[in-house]
Amino acid sequence: MPHFGNYTKTDLRDTSWYDQVNQGQLHREAARFGLELAQLSYDFEAGPWLSAGWTDMVIQVDSRLISGVRLREDVGAWQQGIFNAILPKLARGLTNLTNPITDIKSYLQPDIQLHTGKAVVMIREHAPKRFTIAIGFMGTGRRPQDWASNMRLQREGHFHEGFFDLAAQFESKEAEIRFPSAAQALDMEELTLKDVLEACKQPDSAFRVVAAGHSQGAAVLQIWTHQKLKAGVQKQHLLGFGFASPSVAIDLPQDELLCPLTHFLVADDLIPRVGLRDHLGVSYLLRGDDVFREVCYGEYRDNPLFIETLALLGSLRDTQQGLLFALALLDALRPQPAKAVASALAVFVDHTVYDLPALTEEWTRRLLRFTIMGFQQYYQDAAGKEANPEDIHKMGEKVHALIERFGTVALARMILKTLFLTHSLVGPDMVLADHAPYSYLVVRAFDQLVRLPEPEETESGAKEAMNQEEPAQNTQ
């Protein structure tokens, strides 16, 4: 039906679960709604949402705001239909528009202000004169410059600097995000997201906000939510869902960690183990079994290189170990032929723009040295000290063993493939929509979720709670 989500088939008109989830209950349809909202920030497929009554959609792509997607009225319906078809396609195109100069500056100049945030915002009248605002935060895009924020590992107060900056960028746009249909219904000249959030500081607000994000988007969700609560937005008017959420905070007061956020994590996925130390909100974990891996990994499930790569990535417990692995991999490239080095490095960048295998040997070696220097600095930013060469060597022994057995380029490609397969939000098409870890989680395995302890329940927080077996309590 037209008002059902493309990926989970949940009814996008139904937010009756809001109060239950806001009070801490786990709800299957709410999780499915959250996944649909997170995915909307990637594909901008507005059709089902418009059919469900959502309107006044605004799409943020970098520093741009694209508005004009809304419900069709009787007057000018054909014109609105054109806008609804063209504007989301324009937004999708802009998310893939790369700029090599911007890419290089984003890595060479760590102090440069990045404006690579992406989000989608819309509104729906869920009861007379009562409105729900939905916000989806997009994860890391395909462009190299989109990754730069992830690697800004220094701290902005208690938060990851790169994620904090992206949240601040979205916050700076709040006064420009307008809801003309809701303003008309309320007999107001104008209504902005900033106005909505100001109203949410009152207990009897006519507005409530549901937000969601995947990966980098889930990181931005956490920091933006924290900033809104600190500014006075009341918890009963705000909730969110994170999928594959990195940790974003460290040494934050315990009461500030208790945000009305629910995170869904998959044990095979490395990304929820990196970032800083703590997630804001409550986290639930899915451990993969044979059925999960058969569905989500397909033909790769029995591939020997995939199996060993998955085990190696699974042994990395935090950001520092992840960076040690990257340094070990780069170090293992040093003695390899220049063509193999260039091909391996090309795997991790946009090789449709950078034809690295065509570089001369001299420039290939320079690029490798530059990349190693960059990751050494990332490690120092994250750990507060230089990486220990002995630790790199120890990690490198595992990498060298895989290179000797499978080859340099094959390993690089499998690392990227493994990261993608374990981290994906939805499947490759509508028919196989739940053949990805996080869509599988909300569609097929919701009753298998395990609630992770909150930070005060264990000294190191949820990262070291992967062996907890307590089943989640959820509302079907």
Image (tube, grey):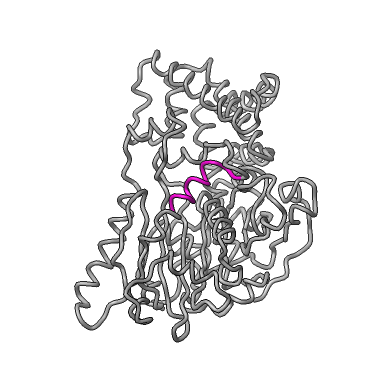
Where does the image place residue 97, in percent across and percent down from the top left? Answer: 31, 44
What residue sits 65% from the left and 59% below the top? 281
Where does the image place residue 427, in percent across and percent down from the top left? Answer: 48, 57
Where does the image place residue 379, in percent across and percent down from the top left? Answer: 60, 29
**Foreground pick, 174 / 160:** 174
Q: Is residue 278 above or below residue 189?
A: above
**Foreground pick, 243 / 125:** 125
Q: Quadrant of residue 57?
A: bottom left
Question: For the C terminus, which image quadrant?
Answer: bottom right
Where does the image place residue 371, in percent across and percent down from the top left? Answer: 49, 24
Q: Quadrant of residue 232?
A: bottom right
Question: For the N terminus, which image quadrant?
Answer: bottom left
What residue sits 38% from the left and 36% below the top? 350
Q: Quadrant of residue 121?
A: bottom left
Residue farthest along the top direction in this orientation? 362
Number of marks drawn: 0
Queried whether the magenta region covers residue 165, the answer comes back as: yes
Position of 182 with respect to 442 (left or right) is: left
Queried whether the magenta region covers residue 431, the answer comes back as: no
**Foreground pick, 328 / 104:** 104
Question: Magenta stretch mostly in which secondary structure?
Answer: helix
What residue sits 36% from the left and 52% below the top? 61
Q: Is residue 321 above or below residue 182?
A: above
Q: Which span of residues is magenta-colored?
A: 159-170
